[in-house]
């Protein structure tokens, strides 16, 4: 009488709970979401296996390792806005079967790592990604990708091919100087219409959009940028 009830746990269950406890004391864990914003973290903390959404904005994280998100089979969104990240292990995110959204804006990244085909949103704006920082055909097989934001980098080309699912492409304030007529459209199929892509931002680039008028015939809207 008066004693707290006890529960029986297997050793594995106890181990997982102890490992997850420090993170959920330091951060806020709500359901599958873990919020670690503005906690002066210099690395990704160990996350509970059930984590679906991880937020670690405004910290001091400098590198992302493959082990940081290993075996996180339910993770759908990672937001690392405004850290000090300079490098990401090439396969840090590739083994995440449910990952859909990655936000790594406002860091110091020069290389965009490989990402799974499940992506719907990628925001790598305000970094140091240059012409060699994106893999060839990096987005081709992402058949559900809707939002690609790479504003304020050092990119000097539009990273083609882009999936038909894409709705919004933000590349303003880069170093893009030219565009091909088949960047967005299919010159072999004049019936091809890219209905989804209604938002293309190329302002702040040294490109004159009026030089390639045929490049926009399949688009619902002309890109925003210099036309003179």
Image (cartoon, helix red, strand yellow):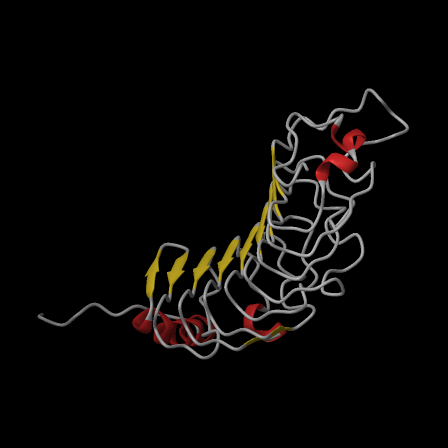
Q: Quadrant of the N terminus?
A: bottom left
Measured as percent of width and height from the top left, residue 215 is found at 78, 33
Residue 77 drawn above or below residue 120: below
Please state which of residues 141 and 199 is positioned toward the viewer in this rendering.
199
Please state which of residues 223 and 165 is positioned toward the viewer in this rendering.
223
Asked whether, in this view, residue 2 is left or right of residue 70, the answer is left
Q: Quadrant of the C terminus?
A: top right
Q: Looking at this view, name the residue that lies furthest to the right.
A: 188
Q: Looking at this view, name the residue that lies furthest to the front.
A: 228
Measured as percent of width and height from the top left, residue 216 is found at 74, 30
Asked whether, in this view, residue 170 is left or right of residue 23, the answer is right
Labels in figure, total: 0
Asked whether, in this view, residue 182 is left or right of residue 88, the answer is right
Measured as percent of width and height from the top left, residue 91 is found at 68, 68
Measured as percent of width and height from the top left, residue 42 is found at 45, 79
Q: Looking at this view, name the residue that lies furthest to the left.
A: 2
Q: Quadrant of residue 20?
A: bottom left
Please state which of residues 87 and 23 is positioned toward the viewer in this rendering.
87
Q: Quadrant of residue 220?
A: top right
Residue 113 drawn above or below residue 44: above
Residue 30 drawn above or below residue 57: above
- Which residue: 25% across, 70% down? 6
């Amino acid at each position: 009488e008066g004693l707290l009830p006890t529960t029986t746990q297997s050793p594995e269950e106890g181990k997982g709970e102890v490992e997850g406890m420090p993170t959920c004391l330091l951060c806020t864990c709500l359901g599958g979401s873990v919020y670690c914003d503005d906690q002066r973290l210099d690395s990704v903390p160990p996350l509970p296996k059930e984590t679906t959404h991880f937020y670690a904005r405004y910290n001091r994280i400098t590198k992302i390792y493959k082990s940081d998100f290993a075996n996180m089979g339910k993770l759908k969104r990672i937001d690392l806005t405004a850290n000090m990240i300079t490098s990401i292990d090439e396969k840090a995110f590739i083994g995440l079967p449910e990952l859909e959204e990655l936000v790594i804006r406002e860091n110091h990244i020069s290389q965009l790592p490989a990402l799974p085909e499940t992506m719907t949103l990628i925001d790598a704006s305000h970094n140091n990604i240059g012409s060699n920082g994106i893999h060839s055909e990096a987005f081709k097989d992402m058949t559900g990708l809707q939002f690609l934001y790479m504003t304020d980098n050092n990119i000097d080309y539009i990273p083609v091919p882009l999936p038909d699912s894409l709705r919004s492409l933000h590349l303003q304030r880069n170093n893009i100087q030219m565009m091909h007529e088949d960047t967005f459209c299919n010159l072999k199929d004049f019936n091809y219409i890219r209905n989804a892509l209604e938002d293309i931002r190329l302002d702040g680039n040294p490109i004159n959009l009026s030089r390639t008028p045929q490049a926009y015939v399949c688009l619902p809207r002309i890109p925003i940028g210099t036309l003179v």
